[in-house]
Image (cartoon, rainbow, N blue to C red):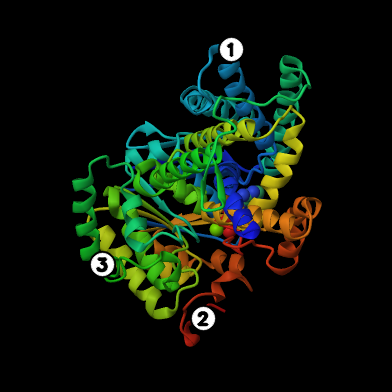
Amino acid sequence: MLTISGLFAGYGSGDVLRGVNLTVQDGSITCVVGPNGAGKSTLLKVVSGLLRPRVGSVTFRGAEIGGATPRKILECGIVQVMQSRNLFPELTVRENVELGGFLLRDASAVRARIATVTEQFPIVGERAGERAGQLSGGQQRMVEFARALMLDPALVVLDEPSMGLEPRAAAMMYDSIRQMRDNGRTILLVEQNVRVGLGLADHGVVMETGRVRLEGTGAEILANPQMRALYLGGTIEEGEVPAGDRGR
Amino acid sequence: MLVLQAIIDGILVGGFYALMAGGLTLVFGVMEIVNFAQGIMVVLGAYLSYALFSHLSIDPFLSLVITMPGMFLIGVAVYWSMIKPIKQDRVIMSLLVMFAVGTIAEGILDLVFTSNLVQISTPYVNNSFTIGSLIFPDIYVYAFLMSVVLLAGVYYLLYRTRFGRSLRASMQNPTAARLVGINTDWVSAYTLGIGVAMAAAGGMVFGLTNSFDAASSYDLISRLLAIVIFGGFGSLSGALIASVLMLVIQDVVAVVWSPTWGQTTFYVILILILLVRPQGLLGRKAVRAQ
Ligand SMILES: Nc1ncnc2c1ncn2[C@@H]1O[C@H](COP(=O)(O)OP(=O)(O)O)[C@@H](O)[C@H]1O
Ligand SMILES: [Mg+2]
């Protein structure tokens, strides 16, 4: 569904991504893990159009989308939820979700989509009139997800959605991701919590210094001895892994 | 009674200062650009209305139908030709670009209109009416009403239209705005256009109530910056309140102490604000999301 090949991209001088190749299968959850600074967020920014590729191609359902505007990419059916600060803090929850349907010209279409996403994320209805900035981290995540589904996207790109969430909120958030997949959406997920992320995924990808190092099913990657080396003293300790289950 | 008169004068004049400062603060809110050219844009608006009046006898209030759309287009063109192409250090570079635009515009205005002071003098420029012993000069009252109408229009645009929603979204979180499909470049271009059109309207009143030349822009921009800092950078309501407060305080100080002190109050207030509440009246403390 999404194919990235030979991708180079970066900021200013120097490339952050140095030849990334990656394929995301239709209807799957693909999880990208890797140490901080590996270029995971940069990769997602290229997919959503925030950053232009320097070399290489990004195709979605056979059409080249590398370098297209975020708006064009949204119209193709790809939506991204960033690592942090996705919402418009001074606008209400309702206005935030409505903005997810900015490209829908028709007000009744927007209302219909709001009704649908509110069923899935009741908080949108419960806190409709509150300023988004006043919600807790977990609640904001749910509003971000609701907004992301406004255009009924085929591919949802999520950058570390568990960041800053308490365990209970994180568990709810993971449930929502599974539900999106069960509703037929494809998910491209970046996750710091390697165990949970790869556990959830159909396909796992390990990135390091701007390249893909390992690929396979989630279980294969978790069992790979190289993973331990990559993460020694690293980020695998973070997240909500139960104390007895830490990877050292 | 003198003090009451001073308060009324301050409110009436504050109205059109709010237009000029509102244009400055909106542009900052959306683009984080301090538009140093806003002062000269006001003067350009004044000269355009002056020229239309003295050559074609078009009433200055009516001339806004021509000058505001014209200057809106100037703002849009400046965005696409000079701000958008900046690739790095946008904030600092755009500050310099706007400074350059201002300097070039000043040079051109100086060439075209010379540096003799002029004033738009319509037949009704010295008319006034009284209520009790209070004096209401006609042009100040018209100008105030016009400012109220235009500012109401800006608020309507901001809070009741699709464009307004995309503008407020871009102000709060430009990256998220792009990710929901808002074209933040067009939002920025239109915002600069609106800011400059507001300067055109303010400039017309400035030209009616003051004699001016191109160099008047320096005093104007310092006052507008003081107002915007007082109100909180990026806050339209803050700019409105600050405009009225500043001019009322200036006029009251002028009658209670002396006119010289009146002029200085702007900067005294500014320094006090910077010491006590650097984010201004309604400014946000935290820097917005990148
Ligand atoms: N906006 C930016 N400007 C310049 N460099 C950046 C920017 N964002 C990220 N980088 C750099 O790119 C590299 C990869 O960052 P990122 O993609 O965020 O990594 P990850 O998400 O894997 O932690 C890092 O070295 C980071 O410093
Ligand atoms: Mg990241």
* Amino acid marked by disc 1: His
Residue at left offset 76%, top offset 20%: B110
- Report which quarter residue A197 is drawn in: bottom left
Label 2 sits on a secondary structure element that is loop
- Report which quarter residue A225 is drawn in: bottom right
The residues tagged by marks 2 and 3 sit, at their Cα atoms, a distance apart of 38 Å
Residue B177 vs B51, above or below: the answer is below
- Looking at the picture, do discs 2 and 3 lie on one chain? yes
Q: Chain of mark 3?
A: A
The residues tagged by marks 3 and 1 sit, at their Cα atoms, a distance apart of 61 Å
The residues tagged by marks 2 and 1 sit, at their Cα atoms, a distance apart of 83 Å
- Which quarter of the figure is the N terminus of chain B placed in? bottom right
Where is mark 1, residue-wise? B55
* Amino acid marked by disc 2: Arg
Residue at left offset 45%, top offset 50%: B169
Residue at left offset 64%, top offset 28%: B82
Where is mark 3, residue-wise? A125
